[in-house]
Amino acid sequence: MAVQEIKGDEYVIEHNDSSHVVGFKGTIRLQTTDDYAPITDLLQKAHGAAGKGKLTLDFRQLQFLNSSGINAISKFVIAARKEDKVSMVVLGSQDIYWQQKSLSNLSKLWSKVQVDIV
């Protein structure tokens, strides 16, 4: 089991190769799309590693993601839709306000995205 990790001052993102889960924790406030490139790269690698299986993006422990980050996640979902090879589950927390609206919009970008706000 390999775990890839990206750490910032206020956040940690982990991809578990065996479970195909990408977990987001903390607060992400990067400024530009270029700043999000390492995160986008990790998501693309996770997508590739999932093969034709399921990829889970777990945001339940992410307190904040700015508009640049939401844009980066949205672009990733659109790219995954074009390839159409994995099923995608997005997990969010009903206790974190921004997740209710922003994460549910991902299913509007690709109908195969299952968004669970619990």
Image: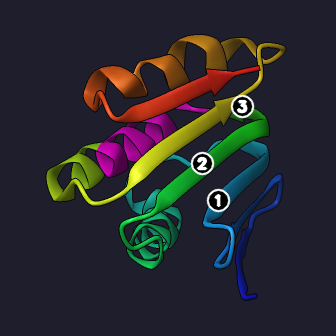
| Residue at the extreme front of the image, as rendered | 53
Residue kind at label 3, given as amino acid type: Phe
Residue kind at label 2, given as amino acid type: Leu
- Please report the residue visible at 22 percent of the width from the left and 53 percent of the height from the top: 84
Q: Which mark is residue 57?
A: 2
- Please report the residue visible at 83 percent of the width from the left and 52 percent of the height from the top: 10
What span is in magenta? 65-77
Q: Which mark is residue 64?
A: 3
Residue annotated with mark 1: 22
Instruction: Give the structural element (helix, strand or loop) at label 1.
Output: strand
Q: Determine if the magenta segment contains residue 72.
A: yes
Instruction: Please state if 31 lies on the left or on the right of 87 as rendered.
Output: right
Q: Gap in Å between the C-alphas at discs 2 and 1?
A: 5 Å
- Badge 3: few (under 14), some or many (20 or more) residues near its Cα, within 10 Å? some
From this viewpoint, is residue 3 visible?
yes
**Is label 3 or label 2 in front?**
2
Q: Which of 61 and 7 is in front in this view?
A: 61
Q: Quadrant of residue 44?
A: bottom left
